[in-house]
Image: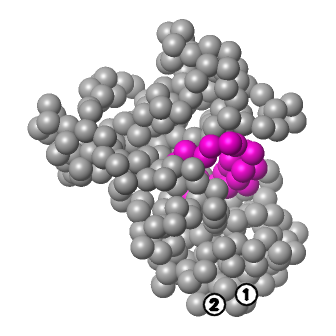
Amino acid sequence: MKTIAAALTTLLSSQHVAGFAPAAGVSRSRSISSLRMAETALSQDELKKMVGYKSVDDYVESGMVVGLGTGSTAYFAVERLGQKLKDGELKDIVAIPTSVRTKEQAESLGIPLVTLDTHSKLDVAIDGADEVDPDLNLVKGGGGALLREKMVEVCADKFIVIVDESKLCDGLGPGFPLPVEITPFCHEHTLRTIASLPTCEGCDAVLRMGSSSTNKPDGDEIAVTDNGNYIVDLHFKEAIKDAPAMASELKNTVGVVDHGLFCDMTTAVIIAGSDGISVKD
């Protein structure tokens, strides 16, 4: 892991953020010692902004096809791409969004959009993650866009993951529920089938309710994804022992559309933390 000591002070400027931007009032509880010019602690929003901007600055070049992730960290990568296109620093870029929300943000910034139907090969995809293990396997899908995210990101030559250090873990599972997208047809049967899989032993399978963009229940209706499917969140008390094996078993279960385990896909992880920005690859 290599620490990048140079500070990009422009990333810390105050801007109005809509859509994915977390609510105002985030406590400033974490400092970045390597940013010597900034003695005040940085909020989680500022950390997300730093890695989001850096991902575009370091990995996106003119003429590329770019996959745009979904979530509060990916928001800043999309924002940065829009800025660089507007300023003329980047040209001839087309992008593929991974959700309706990201599509709307990209359109508002004037980013030209295409789909996998016309561009099946991407140069780079940039997205956040809910958990990252030491092997760079991920849990994604807390925002409900796991299927489209995986479809886009598996087609990219480089998949760049952007997180703050709170997302790093020794083992996937206990720190964040694993989302599984399923068909609405006989969804209770599929939920029970998933919970009974050998690799999922001990999990608590919970149908997502309310908004599909959060795994916190916020409504009485079943959450519906952009694809018209449901999500089951798997809560684990212990770390997943074999993430690739679980990924295979879930994918082979009839009724499962896809799952939030992203194994052997990551090119690099850009991490913002107490020691500055680091890159793990």
Give the residue number, with chain letter if any, for mark 1.
197
Per the rendering, the mark at residue 201 is: 2
192 lies above or below 213: below
Amino acid at the residue labelled 1? Leu
Across and down, in percent, residue 111 comes to 64, 21
Across and down, in percent, residue 175 comes to 45, 71
Across and down, in percent, residue 223 comes to 68, 59
Regarding residue 31, the answer to whether it shows in the image is yes
Amino acid at the residue labelled 2? Glu
The answer to whether marks 2 and 1 mark residues whose Cβ atoms lie closer than 8 Å is: yes
Find out whether residue 110 is within the magenta segment. Answer: no
Residue 146 in which image quadrant: bottom right
16 lies above or below 254: above
**The N terminus - image quarter:** bottom left
The boundaries of the magenta stretch are: 142-161
Numbered disc total: 2
User: Quick check: 31 left or right of 8?
Assistant: left
The crowding category of the residue bearing disc 2, from other C-alpha atoms within 10 Å (few below 14, some 14 to 19, many at least 20), is few
